[in-house]
Amino acid sequence: MEMKIIQSPAEMQLQAHTWKKEGMQIALVPTMGCLHAGHLSLMRKAAENADRIIASIFVNPIQFGPHEDFDAYPRQFQADCDLAEKEGVHVIFCPDTKGMYPHGFQTTVSVGTLSQGMCGANRPGHFDGVATVVSKLLHLTSPDVAIFGEKDFQQLAIIRQMVRDLNFPATIVGAPIVREEDGLAMSSRNKYLQGEMRTQALCLYRSIQSAQKKVAHEQQVVAADTIIEATKKTVAEAGGKLEYAVVINEHSLQAETLVGSSSVLAIAVKIGGVVRLIDNSKLFTTMK
Ligand code: PAF
């Protein structure tokens, strides 16, 4: 089946309804394009879970703050289509802004407490923008399953909550972070890392690795503060600017004082004063 490119939301909805009537299982992979190996892993997971794969490519303006990188966000539509086609994607859904937010649009989906800390505290309105667009994408594509990367850990928790709260009939599946060989988590924003910044960006993964080692080797329960202080030091030494480092419960996203089996270290750092990167990991792993 040749890959189709659909721009119109109405046509997308019709195609999804037709597939549903034919008894097809649909998987949605929502993206903002500039596809990398992380996105391709989501598409592979989608293929394991469904007969029809829809990948959306939409740089969603309402999830960017006024001083953020909406205009500069990397766009490479043709290359994205080629990559998606190789992964067996059936439809690229690429609406334009007017199609998604026509004149007079005024609804916002907002997920409470989960949206408030971490990235939410540093990017006001960001998660309302994400929740709103993801609701629309779910309505337009009727997926049985939608796949999201675990790199955006808070986003994934918010979407799971929204889908529960609003009774979307879709299963949300998280896919593990894909890393470059040296550990840098794949991100479309890695394209912004010039020269020295690329090396500095390793401070996120280095912080995660040393936290995991500490937890694995320590005989006693590790205090979250120890991990956070070590992360601050690692980031500062690399010349990064720490936005936040938190040890949280993987489900509630509430801060934990002691590292337990559900603890996650989540970090956001600005590299070179401009490139904002995030990363996270569970702290109890099988790594020794
Ligand atoms: O993770 C992303 O790329 C975006 O936040 C998403 C989920 C596609 C919504 O615009």
Image (cartoon, rainbow, N blue to C red):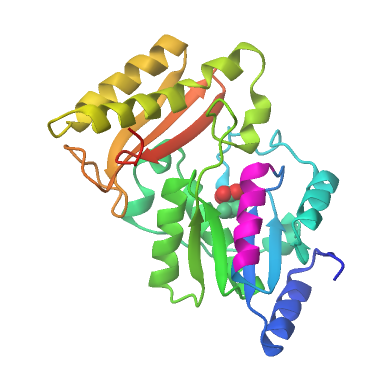
* Relative side of 113 to 18, left or right: left
Give the residue furthest to the bottom.
21
Tell me which residue sits at (41%, 18%) in the image: 235
Pick the residue in front: 154 or 67. 154
Q: Is residue 282 above or below residue 251?
A: above
Residue 56's x, y, as percent?
69, 59
The residue shown at (29%, 41%) is 284
* Image location (x, y in percent) of residue 105: 62, 64
Picture mark count: 0
Asked if residue 91 lies in the magenta stretch, the reply is: no
Quick one: quadrant of the C terminus? top left
Image quarter in which the N terminus is found? bottom right
Q: Quadrant of residue 106?
A: bottom right
Q: Does 83 sit above or below residue 23?
A: above
Is residue 166 visible to us here? Answer: yes
Q: Where does residue 187 sit, x and y in percent of width and height?
A: 60, 37
**Residue 59 appears at what percent x and percent y?**
68, 48
- Which is the main secondary structure of the residues drawn in magenta? helix
Direction left: furthest residue: 220
Name the residue rendered at 87%, 67% in the picture. Answer: 2
Query: Measuring 79% from the left and 68% from the top, which residue is drawn there?
Result: 8
In the image, which residues are magenta?
Answer: 36-48
Say whether residue 230 is left or right of residue 138: left
Q: Is residue 28 visible?
A: no
